[in-house]
Image: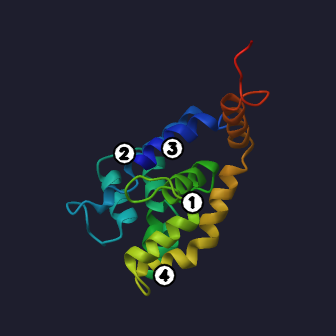
Amino acid sequence: MAVAERAESLAESLAATTRDDRRALVGAAWLHDIGYSAALADTGFHPLDGARHLRRIGFDPRVTALVAHHSCAEAEAKLRGLGAELRSEFPRERTIVADALCMCDFTTGPDGEPLSVTERLDEIRARYGDGHVVTRFSEIAEGDLRAAVARVTTHPDAVAAAVKKTIEVQPMYGRSRPSR
């Protein structure tokens, strides 16, 4: 839920994106981990299992593909021997929307707490341990994950929104004092 809430907030600041882009981002954020459901597990790789389920029920193909490829999933799919299946079944979108979904996922901890990418990667290593496929994936994909987050945080709309938020929060001339 926290990933989706972050996506909703971020979607508002990405003014250059279309309404369809914002809907796709928020929809994919809400559904990105649906493949963890035991009822949907087929391969054991949640992005692929979730996307296949969404496709079966006729869900929006763009959202479905974003779910399939969220957070650099292709790197983990290759480690699991599922890379060709993922690529052949779902097109990978390389847009600010896909980057924003990655950012929302990789800056949110498992309990919904905000984390830096470094903290999130450390959390993954601690939770799964050395040698686990998820840990190996995070090490392989780290550069791509960081690059996606950087593209979002340096996107002109995101920068403008952050500056606006800072200006709204900060008093113009320091701390306000009661007049005498």
Residue 172 quadrant: top right
Residue 92 quadrant: bottom right
Secondary structure of residue under mark 1: loop
Q: Nearer the viewer, mark 2 or mark 1?
A: 1
Residue 123 quadrant: bottom left
Q: Nearer the viewer, mark 3 or mark 1?
A: 1
Q: Disc 2 marks which residue?
A: 59
**CA gap, disc 3 and disc 2:** 19 Å
Q: Disc 1 marks which residue?
A: 116
Please identify the residue farthest to the bottom as the structure is shown: 131
Q: Residue at x 42, y 47 (%)?
A: 2
Q: Is residue 99 above or below residue 15?
A: below
Crowd band around label 2 with a 10 angstrom C-alpha radius: few (<14), some (14–19), many (20+): few
**CA gap, disc 2 and disc 1:** 32 Å
Crowd band around label 3 with a 10 angstrom C-alpha radius: few (<14), some (14–19), many (20+): many
Q: Is residue 118 above or below residue 175?
A: below
Q: Residue at x 50, y 44 (%)?
A: 6
User: Where residue 7 is drawn, which disc sits there?
Assistant: 3
| Of residues 27 and 153, the one drawn nearer to the viewer in this rendering | 153
User: Where residue 136 is drawn, which disc sits there?
Assistant: 4
**CA gap, disc 1 and disc 4:** 19 Å
Label 3 sits on what residue type? Ala
Secondary structure of residue under mark 2: loop
Q: Nearer the viewer, mark 4 or mark 2?
A: 4
Would you say the residues marked 3 and 2 are in contact, meaning their CB atoms lie under 8 Å apart? Answer: no
Looking at the image, is mark 3 or mark 2 earlier in the sequence? 3
Label 1 sits on what residue type? Ser
Label 2 sits on what residue type? Phe
